[in-house]
Image (spheres, helix red, strand yellow):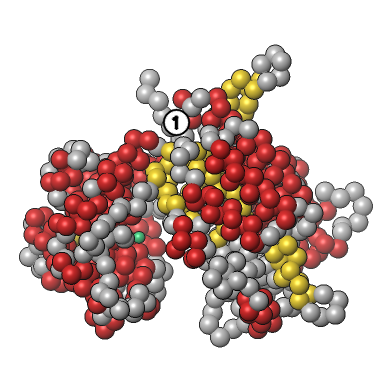
């Protein structure tokens, strides 16, 4: 019987839940299994921290909603109940009451009466006053409308409801507080001020940091994390990993930011082990001022075969640099590829759960990156799950021009796209050089789009090179065509499904794809076309060989712009090809997409790891299972890992 993995789980609102396989877990030696197991426990024990960071009512709200969910005795076909269930599933997905992506508060589809009645059943005596307050938070659209507000000109703290700053602290006050701290801190090696604390007000009105550490704010959760890290340490793969864990625990105990930098330096230097992990206060997107880091946890296992492929590229970096179509003045004389690691996720925790990144590049401290470098990973089992689900989604049937092209895409599967990502990450970004005296920031706001376009073009140009077949990275000389077609289809048509009608492209990667695709369409009208059939528009590629030449010449121009710091040319290219959407075409694409009834946002249910004990009570194995339901997992996490 064919083995079928339960990739797709449930679908609600704008969310589709998936599961991911952990291909190498069962074949790991027990020692590594235990290492992963305890790292995954450490990744789950921080969950409550994030819930409190996202909203000061988050933990109580979750507790009450879950209480209603598990105690409800009424009819299951009741419309209020069903709307309540969708609301709770969305809250779980966002780790709070605001949408995980656009930060707007959810509008509940059930009534305040339903909530108060069902919540009342959880309490034997009178309804606590906090429940009334929660009802305001859930039902009053004026209360906490946005978790993170970035609107220029407004007070970003007073208008954001995230819990990184005590109520009533204004943006200017917080900025002055940190400007003052900055004045007194090390300039050469600046610590990440504000990273691990909540800013609060003293009785005398002055501000102070309430630090997230053992014995401090979130101390109970942090102690459990440290306990699990301590257990993981016994099974570390090498001494360096033990030093990393020791330093991390020291940071959690003291909250000292200098210790955090020491930890980051040790972490980035540990490249031997096959198990990769993140545990701590990491990304700052949840703070409108970009100082305070949300908590996240992650562990993954190196995919040796895929990493070998990526390293084949890195070790040939100079060959690629020498043969690229850019002017020789802009080429690096000595070129080292970035050794990116390909891993399979084993657990997602905190701000990486259930919605996860598929690539991670850390640490975030600029001076540490400059002096010690960074570690970059791509998470291939998550991408694989996305691809599997995309296959059955109907997108290809709807948007690919003909059966012949669909067969081409099916034939080569994920291989060309994964390779394009590797070329982009391992070689593209690292290639080329600026002319002497050119300011690295010369392209200003257009810099990141030009940089992403440059890395994409490097990949597009080389994926058609016979060298890749020779290196054993592509099966034959036709495989690149599959990547060319899907890239242009995405850049010209399908990526628009993520943009609301009336809006323009903002994100750098999306702008870069549009820039490249539309430039090719405009400048090589015989080679690439958008054709209409039965009222629908499709991409047609007439000459793949010529398309490669087009990518080569745009790569040469984009490299020139970057190397010379030609701001005006960058502005022209980006504004002309990378920003505005054709409103009629956008409308058509959205209509076709909506008819497929797909969810624009996806996230993952974690595997469940269970130790298997022998008679003496020692762990003799760790079993991974993949069939836990979404609600069961959420409720189990709330019970098993409740620390705050
Ligand atoms: Zn990139």
The answer to whether 392 appears left or right of 271 in the picture is left
Question: Which quarter of the picture shows residue 251?
Answer: bottom right
In this rendering, does residue 434 appear at all? yes
The answer to whether 575 appears left or right of 238 in the picture is left
The answer to whether 6 appears left or right of 511 in the picture is right
**Residue sitting at 60 percent across and 62 percent down?**
293
Give whichever of 322, 23 is nearer the camera.
Answer: 322
Task: Residue under label 1, please give it.
Answer: 24
Q: Is residue 543 above or below residue 641?
A: below
Q: Is residue 26 above or below residue 248?
A: above
What kind of element bears circle 1?
loop
Q: Position of residue 269 (x, y in %)?
A: 48, 49
- Quarter of the image where the N terminus is located: top left
- Considering every residue shown, the one lying at the far top of the view is 615
**Residue sitting at 24 percent across and 62 percent down?**
332
Give whichever of 238, 621 is nearer the camera.
Answer: 238
Q: Position of residue 123 (x, y in %)?
A: 86, 50
* Count of marks placed on residues: 1
In this rendering, does residue 517 appear at all? no
């Amino acid at each position: 019987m064919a083995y079928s993995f339960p990739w797709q789980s449930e679908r609600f609102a704008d969310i589709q839940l998936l599961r991911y396989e952990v291909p190498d877990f069962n074949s790991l030696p027990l020692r590594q299994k235990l290492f992963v197991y305890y790292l995954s426990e450490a990744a789950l024990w921080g969950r409550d921290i994030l819930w409190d960071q996202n909203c000061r009512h988050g933990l109580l709200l979750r507790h009450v909603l879950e209480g209603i969910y598990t105690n409800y005795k009424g009819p299951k076909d009741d419309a209020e109940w069903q709307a309540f269930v969708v609301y709770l599933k969305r809250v779980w997905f966002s780790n709070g009451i605001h949408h995980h992506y656009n930060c707007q508060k959810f509008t509940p589809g059930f009534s305040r009466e339903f909530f108060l009645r069902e919540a009342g059943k959880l309490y034997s005596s009178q309804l606590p006053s906090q429940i009334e307050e929660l009802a305001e938070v859930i039902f009053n659209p004026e209360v906490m409308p946005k978790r993170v507000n970035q609107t220029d000109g407004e007070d970003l703290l007073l208008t954001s409801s995230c819990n990184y700053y005590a109520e009533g602290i204004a943006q200017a006050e917080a900025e002055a507080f940190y400007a003052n701290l900055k004045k007194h801190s090390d300039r050469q090696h600046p610590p990440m001020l504000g990273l691990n604390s909540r800013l609060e007000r003293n009785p005398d009105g002055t501000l102070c940091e309430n630090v997230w550490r053992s014995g401090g704010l979130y101390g109970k959760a942090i102690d459990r994390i440290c306990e699990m890290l301590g257990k993981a340490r016994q099974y570390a793969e090498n001494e360096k990993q033990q030093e990393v864990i020791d330093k991390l625990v020291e940071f959690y105990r003291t909250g000292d930011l200098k210790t955090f930098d020491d930890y980051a330096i040790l972490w980035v230097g540990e490249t031997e082990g096959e198990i990769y992990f993140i545990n701590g206060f990491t990304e700052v997107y949840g703070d409108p001022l970009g100082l305070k880091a949300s908590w996240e946890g992650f562990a993954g296992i190196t995919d040796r075969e895929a990493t070998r492929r990526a390293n084949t590229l890195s070790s040939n970096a100079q060959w690629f640099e020498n043969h690229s179509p850019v002017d020789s003045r802009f080429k690096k004389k000595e070129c080292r590829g970035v050794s990116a690691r390909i891993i399979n996720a084993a657990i997602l925790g905190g701000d990486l759960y259930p919605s996860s990144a598929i690539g991670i590049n850390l640490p975030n401290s600029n001076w540490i990156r400059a002096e010690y470098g960074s570690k970059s990973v791509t998470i291939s089992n998550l991408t694989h799950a996305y691809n599997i689900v995309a296959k059955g989604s109907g997108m290809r049937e709807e948007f690919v021009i003909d059966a012949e092209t669909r067969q081409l895409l099916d034939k080569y599967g994920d291989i060309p796209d994964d390779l394009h990502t590797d070329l982009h990450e391992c070689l593209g970004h690292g290639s080329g050089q600026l002319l002497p005296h050119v300011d690295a920031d010369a392209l200003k706001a257009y810099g990141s789009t030009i940089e992403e376009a440059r890395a994409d073009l490097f990949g597009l140009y080389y994926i058609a090179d016979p060298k890749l077949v020779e290196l054993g990275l592509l099966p034959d000389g036709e495989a690149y065509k599959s990547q060319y077609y899907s890239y242009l289809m995405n850049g010209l048509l399908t990526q628009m499904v993520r943009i609301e009608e009336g809006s323009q492209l903002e994100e750098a990667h999306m702008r870069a794809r549009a820039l490249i695709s539309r430039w090719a369409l405009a400048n090589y009208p015989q080679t690439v076309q958008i054709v209409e059939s039965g009222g629908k528009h499709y991409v047609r590629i007439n000459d793949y060989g010529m398309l490669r030449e087009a990518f080569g010449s745009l790569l040469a121009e984009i490299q020139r712009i970057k190397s010379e710091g030609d701001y005006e040319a960058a502005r022209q290219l980006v504004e002309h090809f990378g920003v505005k959407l054709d409103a009629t075409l956008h409308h058509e694409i959205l209509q076709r997409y909506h008819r497929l009834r797909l969810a624009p946002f996806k996230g993952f249910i974690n595997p469940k790891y269970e130790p298997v004990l022998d008679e003496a009570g020692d762990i003799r194995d760790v079993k991974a299972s993949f069939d836990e339901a979404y609600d069961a997992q959420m409720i189990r996490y709330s019970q098993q890992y409740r620390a705050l």
